[in-house]
Image: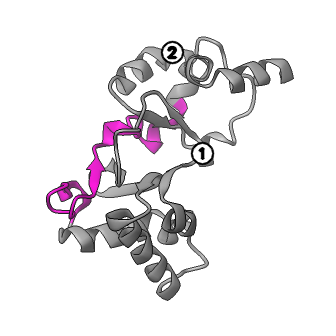
Amino acid sequence: MCQSALWKYGGLYLDLDIITFRDVGGLENFVALERDDSLNNAVLHLSPRGLGHELASDLLDRLGSDFRGDSWNYNGPKLLNRALLARCNVTQPREMRKDRCQGFTVLGIPAFYPLSYEQWWWVFEEARAQDVWRAISGSYGLHTWGSLSSARHGVVSNRAAFSQLVQRYCPRVFNYSARVL
């Protein structure tokens, strides 16, 4: 996570394996649930002052005092979970609401994680394309689980949802990769 850049400048952080479909420009100070019991820091917005800056400071303080070099998960998603559970004074991420979280917004699972990490492969399979399109209806974007999907080898069919999504929402990347392949 790039807490120090968000602390200094604020803004939107997206992992490189996120495909966005809708503008999030109207949203501020948010993260999304990955599952009912877990936030994921692959998408995070923090304002440069006020609430966003306070949360970034808290994350950096926690990272400085409780860093574990053996676990990226502990220092990333779990760090964010611990900080927001404390800020929102709740025991489960699914209980986080803007009014409980001092104005910080926790988006629902469909916002960026309509496919769970167990379903990462759906986006690459022709037979699952319609399931993917149904799942992402109304989403802001899709986490494509690059840590899992990066091991996939071979060309992705044009009829797979991944190819269709990249062609539609990332045309420059699609055109470049079509020339390279």
Amino acid type of the residue that numbered disc 2 sits on in the rendered structure: Ala
Residue at left 46%, top 27%?
A: 21
Residue at left 55%, top 80%?
A: 68
- Residue 145 inside the magenta-drawn segment: no
The residue under label 1 is 148
The spot of residue 89 in percent (x, y) is 18, 72
Disc 1 to disc 2: CB gap under 8 Å: no
User: Extreme left residue here?
Assistant: 99
Residue 131, placed above or below residue 85: above
Name the quarter where the C terminus is drawn: top right
Q: Distance between the residues labelled 1 and 2?
A: 19 Å
Q: Residues in magenta?
A: 92-121
The residue under label 2 is 127
The spot of residue 11 in percent (x, y) is 48, 53
Tell me if mark 2 has few (under 14), some (14-19) or many (20+) residues whose alpha carbon lies within 10 angstroms of its own. Answer: few
The spot of residue 121 in percent (x, y) is 54, 32
Residue at left 62%, top 18%?
A: 167
User: Extreme top residue here?
Assistant: 159
User: What label does residue 24 carry, if any?
Assistant: none
